[in-house]
Image: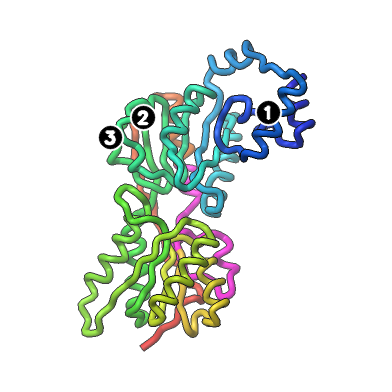
């Protein structure tokens, strides 16, 4: 009996069966229980020699993605897979919870699949503590700057998140909005949402006009459902808010649905902006005003850097790529 037989009998994919056999995360309790039952009933024993042979050679480039609802990450990882395939490089994509510990997961992977390198999408740098010294293979952090880690094995590609939200906040202020809601992430240092929050705060603090501006921040996960729930909470507590700045487009879609359910028309009664520039933002009704992150540049530069590290043992490098504010139809001038 082979792993393919276990997959066929259990009804789950080969990747899921493999994670259960290797005692990895990312598998539901129900799936794990059923697969283990099939293994036990059929007396399946993994080929230890084959596993050891696989571990002895560098296997693939691993991409660890935090959360499974971020459409920006889906676009980037698809581009990465296509680019690496052009270099005959295998790619393993692993999803972990948005609150998961990616560095712990990465260290485990270095022992279980012996990857050539690891890419991180959605990294929380606060988790890259002393354990980062154990990271001895090439790593590329995408959408978060990693220069503070001081590890020559780790590089990063990002935009200037603080400048981007500063620009978006100024845009709303110049459109006449003085009561702004900000939704998304957690405000703790070394998290991407902290940088975005800081850009908004700086723009509000610098607003020197006679009419006072202020904002209310509501933390939430990066999902449509979380954006929906946070919006209802915000508008119940702060009904005078005239604009909501979501810290991702995925959250913004939840914001727009919540506004509709509360009977608020966008942009006539509530303006909404996003962050990321995912394709869906251009098909929302109305089209979403957002910050565009160039996923083509991020993916191609990430792959270039990873391959350079793999083949030439280059030192870590950190790049900030351009962004742009895309004006859609979701913001109204007031006042």
Q: Which of marks 3 and 1 is in front?
A: 1
Residue tagged 3: 150
| Crowd tier of the residue under label 1, counting other residues whose Cα lies within 10 Å: few below 14, some 14–19, many 20 or above | some
Q: In this view, does 51 lie above or below 326?
A: above
Q: Check residue 153 in the rendering and tell me which mark sits there, or answer none.
A: 2
Where residue 188 appears, as percent x and y from the top left, is: 32, 52
Q: Check residue 223 in the rendering and tell me which mark sits there, or answer none.
A: none
Please tell me which residue lies in front, 10 or 162.
10
Are the residues tagged 2 and 3 within 8 Å (C-beta)?
no
Q: Quadrant of residue 140?
A: top left
The residue lying furthest to the bottom in this view is: 335
Please tell me which residue lies in front, 216 or 246.
216
Where residue 233 appears, as percent x and y from the top left, is: 45, 71
Q: In which quarter of the image is the C terminus?
A: bottom left
Q: Residue at x 31, y 66 (%)?
A: 200
Q: Residue at x 36, y 74 (%)?
A: 180
* Residue 4 in the figure: left or right of residue 297: right
Q: Residue at x 37, y 52 (%)?
A: 192
Please report the bounds of the magenta region as a residue range. 275-301
Q: In this view, does 39 lie above or below 258?
A: above
SS category of the residue bearing label 3:
loop
SS category of the residue bearing label 1:
helix
Q: Quadrant of the N terminus?
A: top right
Where residue 322 appears, as percent x and y from the top left, is: 39, 55
Where residue 104 appears, as percent x and y from the top left, is: 42, 33
Residue tagged 1: 36
Q: Nearer the viewer, mark 2 or mark 1?
A: 1
SS category of the residue bearing label 2:
loop
């Amino acid at each position: 009996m082979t792993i393919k037989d276990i997959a066929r009998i259990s009804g789950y994919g080969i990747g899921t069966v493999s994670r259960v056999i290797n005692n990895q995360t990312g598998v539901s309790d129900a799936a794990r229980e059923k697969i283990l039952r099939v293994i036990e009933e059929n007396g399946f024993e993994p080929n230890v020699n084959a596993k050891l042979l696989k571990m002895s050679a560098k296997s693939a480039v691993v991409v660890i993605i935090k959360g499974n609802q971020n459409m920006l990450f889906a676009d980037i990882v698809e581009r990465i897979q296509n680019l690496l395939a052009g270099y005959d490089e295998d790619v393993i994509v692993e999803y972990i919870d948005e609150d998961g510990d990616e560095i712990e997961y990465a260290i485990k992977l270095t022992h279980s699949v012996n990857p050539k390198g690891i890419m991180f999408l959605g990294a929380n740098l606060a988790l890259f503590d002393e354990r980062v010294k154990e990271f001895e293979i090439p790593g590329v952090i995408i959408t978060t700057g990693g220069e503070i880690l001081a590890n020559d094995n780790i590089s990063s590609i990002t935009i200037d998140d603080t400048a981007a939200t500063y620009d978006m906040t100024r845009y709303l202020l110049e459109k006449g909005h003085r009561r702004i809601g900000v939704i998304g992430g957690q405000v703790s240092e070394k998290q991407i949402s902290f940088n975005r929050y800081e850009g908004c705060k700086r723009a509000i603090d610098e607003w020197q006009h006679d009419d006072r501006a202020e904002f209310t921040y509501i933390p939430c996960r990066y999902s449509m459902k979380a954006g929906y729930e946070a919006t209802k909470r915000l508008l119940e507590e702060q009904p005078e808010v005239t604009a909501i700045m979501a810290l991702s487009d995925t959250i913004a879609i939840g914001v727009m649905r919540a506004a509709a359910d509360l009977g608020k028309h966008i942009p006539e009664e509530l303006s909404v902006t996003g962050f990321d520039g995912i394709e869906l933002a251009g098909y929302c009704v109305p089209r979403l005003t957002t910050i565009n992150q160039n996923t083509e540049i991020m993916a191609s530069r990430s792959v270039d850097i990873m391959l350079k590290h793999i083949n030439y043992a280059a030192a870590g490098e950190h790049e900030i790529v351009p962004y742009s504010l895309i004006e859609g139809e979701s913001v109204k001038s007031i006042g």
